[in-house]
Amino acid sequence: MTTPQVDQKRALNKLKHDLEPLRNAIVGVYDLLTWEKQYYAGIVFAAISINYLILWYMDLSCITLFSLLALSAFFGDFALPTLSRLLASGNKWEGEQEAKFEEVCGQLCSIRARATQWYEYLLNERKPTMVVVAISVTLLVVAWIGAIINNLLLMYFATIVVLMWPGLQEKDVFKSLTQKASKIVNEKLQYGKKKLQ
């Protein structure tokens, strides 16, 4: 094995160890987001819609909203491992569940590796001035869109896309589009690696 492969394997093992207390919850969420059953898509869509409807109705200020989100994250970080152990104490951990857990951990490691590659590609290969200009233009466009369209509506659509994407990908809805985009991204990464060497 080469050094990068050993590092990836080490990172995967560390991630699996760190997520061990949450493995039952992770496998459940994975099944939900990849639409293991047909009605899971409706559950995901309804849950997102109800949450955003409640947020719209409450009309919270930004500080209150961020405080409540942080409180929810803190409570989830505290309670989720305990609840996961209690709910799964009667269930046996099977090979199929272990395979799903390993797949999720592998996907998370892959996402991290790609983000690192893009970061290195943009900062080492490209001119820093071009990166600053491109990021500035992108942020200005996003700010302009945010000024025109209601922010809560934009976040609702973004959340729908992010949480429905794994199910759409699992059901091969956008297979040809993702293949073309992946091919372009991989070509750019390979070109950047060759230039760095």
Image (spheres, helix red, strand yellow):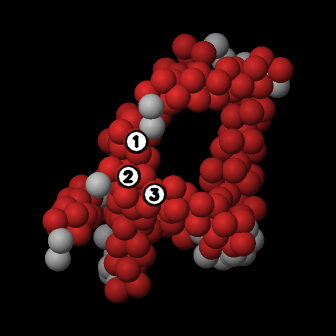
Secondary structure at badge 3 equals helix
Residue at (45%, 57%) from the top-left corner?
191
Q: Which numbered marker is on residue 125? A: 1
| Residue 150 point in image, percent of width and height | 80, 24
Left or right: where does residue 130 sit relative to residue 21?
A: right
Q: Which residue is mark 2?
A: 195
Q: Please say if 8 is above or below 45.
A: below
| Residue 105 point in image, percent of width and height | 36, 64
Q: Are marks 2 and 3 in contact (CB under 8 Å)?
A: yes
Q: Nearer the viewer, residue 126 or 69?
A: 126
Q: Amino acid at mark 1?
A: Glu
Q: Earlier in the sequence, mark 1 or mark 2?
A: 1
| Residue 91 point in image, percent of width and height | 36, 77
Total marks shown come to 3
Q: Are marks 1 and 2 in contact (CB under 8 Å)?
A: yes
Q: CA distance from mark 1 to mark 3?
A: 10 Å
Q: Residues within 10 Å of mark 3 (few under 14, many from 20)?
A: few
Q: CA distance from mark 1 to mark 2?
A: 7 Å
Residue at (55%, 13%) from the top-left corner?
63
Left or right: where does residue 176 sit relative to residue 197?
A: right
Q: Which residue is mark 3?
A: 191
